[in-house]
């Protein structure tokens, strides 16, 4: 029986953000790689998916990028539900429901800017003289709410895309249907729109068998909620929070490099980490992970592997990372190439609209001495 969508629109992810806050984007290469693999499995073009540190259960699209909150990860127990939500948001992306643009805002007491969407979406980055790779990037909540309002027609288009791929990939919708029947507290899930019984009924007709959650889904859920179905994973992350880590302990079916990466991010010393980090990149090709790796090599003066930094320099994905210019400014400073170092720092601070820092670096290099290839990729000549 053909499903009618005339009066159906999914309001899964309407934003109920607190207008006074900005929410940190968590760059998690494991989380981001998980969605790359889903895209491959579903035969979709890959689109960037990012995680937002916020307790409200939401997901949304800005430009061509998808954002999920940690609150959403916490309330979802069935991996198929997350996949369905991803498909709905992906529907917005391919239908081009949001236009990329640059917007300037004034936020709290600090002068902040919006960086362009090719990098991390609408990122609000506050200038800091000690800025490094670990610096938080945040999304302005009021701005998100203003530009993320969906029309009924765009919601219907996204729903149609989702339903088509739910059927194609035999995705279970039982938990999704429960979500639509309830208003979650304190997340205020679905509060801003009326529930639609026809929509619920249509989902109920799609009755595919419930599948077991994957290891990586349980890993991600344990990391951000400590309440996955895998108690060992929950305990692992709870122990990390308590500053407890046993390098000899193994977790079934989780690669050792991934386990040690989580510990490394928490500040634990890992034996032979420079080689293990490189091994991790062989199983996870995430561009931000590469930025972290380069930063590790520089901070630990691993000069024997600086050729890797040169080899990665014109990697397209890497060049789209927000900290690309910063990290190469840092690299060229390390190898005492002041001209290129100042050039890349100039690029970085111009992009973040930090005039004083930009002026400082931009006056300290001669453009005639900058290689043609570097200049050709520069945002600012």
Image (spheres, grey):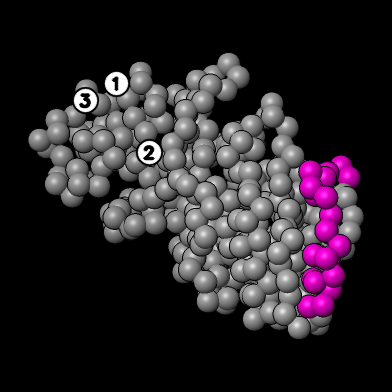
Spot occupied by residue 262 in the image (x, y as percentages of width and height): 64, 55
Spot occupied by residue 133 in the image (x, y as percentages of width and height): 48, 40
- Give the extent of the magenta segment: 185-206
Q: Pick out the residue farthest to the left.
A: 368
Whether residue 91 is visible = yes
Q: Earlier in the sequence, mark 3 or mark 2?
A: 2
Who's the residue at 89% across and 45% down the image? 185
Judge the density around disc 2: few (<14), some (14-19), many (≥20) Cα neighbours within 10 Å. many
SS under mark 2: helix
Q: Nearer the viewer, residue 299 or 146?
A: 146
Q: Nearer the viewer, residue 177 or 59?
A: 177
Spot occupied by residue 135 in the image (x, y as percentages of width and height): 53, 36
Q: Nearer the viewer, residue 150 or 361?
A: 150
Location of residue 100 (image quadrant): top left
Which residue corresponds to mark 3?
Answer: 364
Whole-angstrom CA distance, mark 2 to mark 1, is 14 Å
Q: Are marks 3 and 2 in contact (CB under 8 Å)?
A: no
Q: Is residue 189 magenta?
A: yes
Location of residue 290 (image quadrant): bottom left
Which residue corresponds to mark 2?
Answer: 326
Labelled disc at residue 181: none
SS under mark 3: loop
Q: Are marks 3 and 1 in contact (CB under 8 Å)?
A: yes
Tell me the quarter of the image containing the C terminus.
Answer: top left
Judge the density around disc 1: few (<14), some (14-19), many (≥20) Cα neighbours within 10 Å. few
Labelled disc at residue 360: 1
> In screen coordinates, is 293 left or right of 23?
left
């Amino acid at each position: 029986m053909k499903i009618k969508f005339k009066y159906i629109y999914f309001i899964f992810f309407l934003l109920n953000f607190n207008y006074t806050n900005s929410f940190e984007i968590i760059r998690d290469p494991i989380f981001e790689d998980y969605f790359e693999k889903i895209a491959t499995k579903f035969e979709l073009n890959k689109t960037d998916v990012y995680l937002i540190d916020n307790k409200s259960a939401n997901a949304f699209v800005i430009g061509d990028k998808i954002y999920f909150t940690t609150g959403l990860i916490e309330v979802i127990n069935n991996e198929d539900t997350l996949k369905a939500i991803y498909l709905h948001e992906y529907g917005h992306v391919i239908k081009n429901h949001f236009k990329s643009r640059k917007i300037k805002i004034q936020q709290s007491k600090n002068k902040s800017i919006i960086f362009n969407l090719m990098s991390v979406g609408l990122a609000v980055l506050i200038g800091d003289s000690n800025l490094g790779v670990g610096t938080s990037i945040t999304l302005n909540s009021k701005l998100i709410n203003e530009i993320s309002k969906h029309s009924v027609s765009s919601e219907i288009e996204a729903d149609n895309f989702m339903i088509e791929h739910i059927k194609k990939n035999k995705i279970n919708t039982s938990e999704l249907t429960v979500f639509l029947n309830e208003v979650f507290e304190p997340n205020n899930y679905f509060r801003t729109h009326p529930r639609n019984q026809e929509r619920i009924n249509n989902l109920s007709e799609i009755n595919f068998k419930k599948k077991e959650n994957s290891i990586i889904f349980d890993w991600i859920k344990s990391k951000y909620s400590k309440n996955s179905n895998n108690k060992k994973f929950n305990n692992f992350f709870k122990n990390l929070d308590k500053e407890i880590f046993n390098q000899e302990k193994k977790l079934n079916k989780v690669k050792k490099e991934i386990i040690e990466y989580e510990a490394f991010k928490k500040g634990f010393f890992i034996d032979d980490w420079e080689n293990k980090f490189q091994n991790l990149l062989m199983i996870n090709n995430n561009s931000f992970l590469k930025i972290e790796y380069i930063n590790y090599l520089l901070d630990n003066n691993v000069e024997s592997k600086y050729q890797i930094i040169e080899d990665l320099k014109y990697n397209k994905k890497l060049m789209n990372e927000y900290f690309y210019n910063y990290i190469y400014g840092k690299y060229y400073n390390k190898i005492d190439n002041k001209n290129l170092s100042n050039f890349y720092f100039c690029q970085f601070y111009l992009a973040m609209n930090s005039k004083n820092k930009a002026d400082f670096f931009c006056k300290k290099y001669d453009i005639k001495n900058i290689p043609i290839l570097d200049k050709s990729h520069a945002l600012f000549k």
